[in-house]
Amino acid sequence: MSDFGSSKILAGVGSILLLIPAANIVGIILVLIGMKGLSEHYKDDNIYRNAVKGVIFGIIGFITLIMGILSINIISISTASTVHLDEFVVRSTNAVVAVVMLLAILFVFMLLMAIYFRKAFGALADRSGEQLFNTVGTLLLIGAVLTIAFFIGLILVYISFIIAIVAFFSLKAGINTPAHSYTPPPTIPPFQSAPTTNTEANYCSYCGAPVLPGSVFCSRCGRQI
């Protein structure tokens, strides 16, 4: 099991590397290792499991983006070498359709990646008490939605990584237990037994007959006691 201190450092350093395009792969690996250690520390599998799903969808989205760029380059070269106008129009139309389809696929996978990372960061926020992770997840989701506006989406994603760095290094080892409101039951007064009456018989001072306590007259002689 990974040590808590090393796990949060690995996740924090990985988040830093995610800001550097050339070190993205290493950053993703370090973040996953760190998230696994944090998941074990906080005893919540949702942290690591959702992070893995987010990475998988992100990789698929990245591969889709690369394929889209390559397709655009290939179609541009072939279209530029086209002599006939009709063939040029057909290839250009096909290129536009291919680009739109690839962008739509990229959007879907980026959105799925953000959704699962938001779940992972949300679980981490609940278990650690560090609410910055909720902000990270929300910015990632908004950034994924705004991938249509490419630069705005990337800016929000980069901001979320920066906040993630702060959040990881701010983590505390204690496990947070969400407080639930508790209303104590109404106080029930202790049971009080009814006062007991002494049923031991007294005796009439006149005739000696037994009489019950509280009697005014003797049941035998009729005199007042």
Image: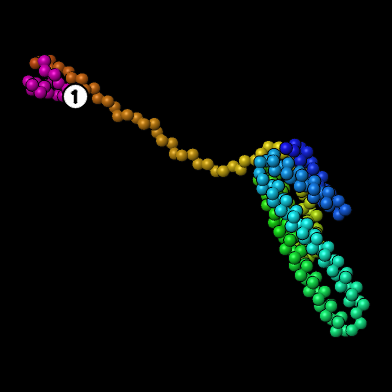
Q: Which residues are magenta?
A: 208-225
Residue at 76% in and 47% down? 32
Residue at 80% in and 60% down? 63
Instruction: Please state which of residues 38 and 156 is positioned toward the viewer in this rendering.
Output: 38
Residue at 86% in and 82% down? 87
- Which percent across, then down, holds residue 216? 14, 24
The residue under label 1 is 214
Q: Relative to residue 60, is residue 190 depicted above or below?
A: above
Left or right, 83 with respect to 209, comes to: right
- Which percent across, then down, holds residue 165? 79, 46
Q: How many numbered circles does the render carry?
A: 1
Q: Is residue 49 magenta?
A: no
Q: Relative to residue 177, is residue 199 depicted above or below?
A: above
Residue 127, quarter of the rendered image: top right
At mark 1, the secondary structure is loop
Q: Residues within 10 Å of mark 1 (few under 14, many from 20)?
A: few
Q: Relative to residue 95, is residue 142 depicted above or below?
A: above
Q: Is residue 218 magenta?
A: yes
Residue 88, quarter of the rendered image: bottom right
Q: Quadrant of the N terminus?
A: top right
- Which percent across, then down, holds residue 152? 79, 62
The kind of residue on which mark 1 rests is: Gly
- Which percent across, then down, holds residue 68? 82, 66
Residue at 11% in and 15% down? 208
